[in-house]
């Protein structure tokens, strides 16, 4: 089977993890282009859109923004079955909830304390395809910026520890799932895969153990993971 398209991505970007999970769940052959974090101006969607993920399909058509990309891939390659729902109001509300709350919770857990910010930036500088100089620049300049400027403000504003924040989010999400195994019922749908992508984006870091302590959350997470064809 030929490639369905190219995913232009950063390895550590949570929005890219959302799309990657979907592609793996549907077992869609594709190419991954790991971009240099300092060169998002060179993306096929630039200059209008300088963010990853960017999806370029086999006809060279360009799609941007992770949730619209997921809906597009599901509709073209899966008859829209993961987005179809008997209760569109519930679906739309929770997709918005996932994108609003889970996306904001990744920075606090990764960069919210001096120690974790240092661990994360060291790991990011190894995982991403930086250039020779930008790798070194990021490794020492990235962490005070992420920790001192961005993460500290967010943690303070929220008031909870990053771990408590994640456990609360998982509680809320699982309460909505109720007795079923997934948000989508007996099988994951696009909401499960989006939420899964945000959680999975923490998995390359030692801080993931704080999320692993949420037993019910991990049960759901591992269940979604077991549907991926990787
Ligand atoms: N709403 C977008 C957000 C994407 C996003 O913010 N990506 C970050 C990386 S995690 C990025 O590319 N930032 C580069 C920039 O803003 O110049 C999505 O869901 O795809």
Image (cartoon, rainbow, N blue to C red):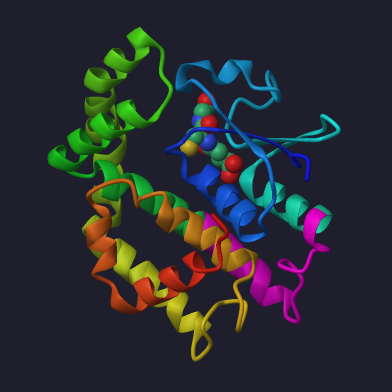
Q: Is residue 198 left or right of residue 88?
A: left
Residue 115 point in image, percent of width and height = 13, 40
Q: Quadrant of ligand 1?
A: top right
Q: Is residue 78 left or right of residue 31?
A: right
Q: Residue at x 73, y 66 (%)?
A: 83
Q: Single out the residue that lies furthest toward the bottom.
A: 179
Q: Residue at x 59, y 61 (%)?
A: 96
Residue 159 visible from this viewpoint: no
Secondary structure mostly seen in the magenta stretch: helix
Q: Quadrant of the C terminus?
A: bottom right
Q: Single out the residue that lies furthest toward the left.
A: 115
Residue 195 point in image, percent of width and height = 50, 62
Residue 105 point in image, percent of width and height = 37, 53
The residue nearer to you, when weighing 209 against 87, is 209
User: To which quarter of the image does residue 65 belong?
Assistant: top right
Q: Is residue 59 left or right of residue 65?
A: right
Q: Quadrant of the N terminus?
A: top right
Q: Residue at x 33, y 46 (%)?
A: 204
Numbered label tally = 0
Residue 184: within the magenta?
no
Q: Is residue 94 above or below residue 118?
A: below
Q: Is residue 106 above or below residue 3?
A: below
Q: Is residue 78 left or right of residue 102?
A: right
The residue nearer to you, when weighing 204 against 39, is 204
Residue 186 point in image, percent of width and height = 60, 83
User: To which quarter of the image does residue 227 belong?
Assistant: bottom right
The stretch in magenta equals 77-99
């Amino acid at each position: 089977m030929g490639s369905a398209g190219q995913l232009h991505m950063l390895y550590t970007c949570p929005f890219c993890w959302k799309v990657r999970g979907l592609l793996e769940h549907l077992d869609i052959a594709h190419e991954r282009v790991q971009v240099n974090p300092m060169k998002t101006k060179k993306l096929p969607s630039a200059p209008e859109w300088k963010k990853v993920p960017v999806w370029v399909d086999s006809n060279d058509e360009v799609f941007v923004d992770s949730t619209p990309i997921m809906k597009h891939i599901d509709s073209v390659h899966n008859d829209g079955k993961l987005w179809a729902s008997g209760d569109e109001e519930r679906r739309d509300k929770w997709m918005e909830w996932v994108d609003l709350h889970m996306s904001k919770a990744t920075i606090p857990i990764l960069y919210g304390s001096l120690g974790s910010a240092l661990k994360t930036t060291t790991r990011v500088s190894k995982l991403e395809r930086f250039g020779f100089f930008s790798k070194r620049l990021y490794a020492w300049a990235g962490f005070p910026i992420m920790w001192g400027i961005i993460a500290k403000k967010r943690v303070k504003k929220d008031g909870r520890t990053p771990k408590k924040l994640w456990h609360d989010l998982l509680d809320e999400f699982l309460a909505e799932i109720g007795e079923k195994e997934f948000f989508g019922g007996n099988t994951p749908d696009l909401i499960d895969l989006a939420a899964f992508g945000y959680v999975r984006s923490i998995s390359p870091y030692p801080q993931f153990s704080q999320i692993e302590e949420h037993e019910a959350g991990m049960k759901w997470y591992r269940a979604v993971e077991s549907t991926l064809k990787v």
